[in-house]
Image (cartoon, rainbow, N blue to C red):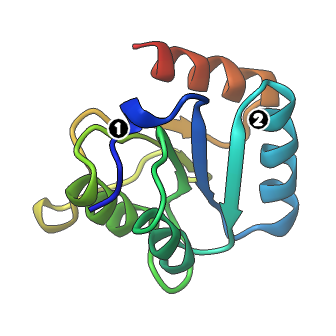
Amino acid sequence: MTAKPSSVTISRILLAEDDDSMRSFLVRALKKAGYDVIAFPNGEEAFERLKSEPFTLLLTDIVMPKMDGIELARRASELDPDLKIMFITGFAAVVLNSDTAAPKDARVLSKPFHLKDLVREVDRLLAA
């Protein structure tokens, strides 16, 4: 079990995004906004890091190789029920069945989005 986010002094974001250029843009925007960001190209690597370090937010693409964002979010919320979750997706509508349902308080931001919109949504989620 990982440490609770309340023990983290700065908001730490775990980012899982398989598109290299998108991941790079997101990291730069979030770091510029003052967040500590650790990024991975797939859910499997992100989950391994989550098992050993506390984070306040999981920001994940939904469609990725190895482990998709829904599975990553499900496993992450089992490790830390207080972890906030936001999905980013290029699909206008994502159909979830009951076996792969995302955590109930997760937010979804659809691509394309402006980076300042992402930062605003992250700020709102972390302030809630």
20 up-or-down from 80: above or below: below
> Picture coordinates of residue 10 (x, y %)?
61, 29
Q: Residues within 10 Å of mark 2 (few under 14, many from 20)?
A: some
> Picture coordinates of residue 38 (x, y %)?
68, 56
Image quarter hosting the N terminus: bottom left
Residue 30 tag number? 2
Outermost bottom residue: 66
- Left or right: residue 98 compared with residue 101: left
Amino acid of disc 2: Leu
Residue 106 tag number? 1
Residue drawn at x 20%, y 58% as measured from the top left: 78
Image quarter hosting the C terminus: top left
Looking at the picture, tell me which residue is in the foreground, 128 or 116. 128
Looking at the picture, tell me which residue is in the foreground, 57 or 36. 36
Amino acid of disc 1: Ala
Q: Residues within 10 Å of mark 1 (few under 14, many from 20)?
A: some
Residue 39 tag number? none
66 up-or-down from 21: above or below: below
Residue drawn at x 88%, y 61% as measured from the top left: 21
Residue drawn at x 55%, y 36% as measured from the top left: 109
> Picture coordinates of residue 112 (x, y %)?
73, 40
123 up-or-down from 31: above or below: above
> Picture coordinates of residue 87 (x, y %)?
49, 46
Looking at the picture, tell me which residue is in the foreground, 17 or 80. 80
Outermost left residue: 98
* Image quadrant assignment for residue 39: bottom right
Dot 1: element: loop
As measured in the structure, the alpha-carbon distance from the residue carrying label 2 to the one carrying label 1 is: 19 Å
Dot 2: element: helix
Q: Are marks 2 and 1 in contact (CB under 8 Å)?
A: no
Q: Nearer the viewer, mark 2 or mark 1?
A: 2
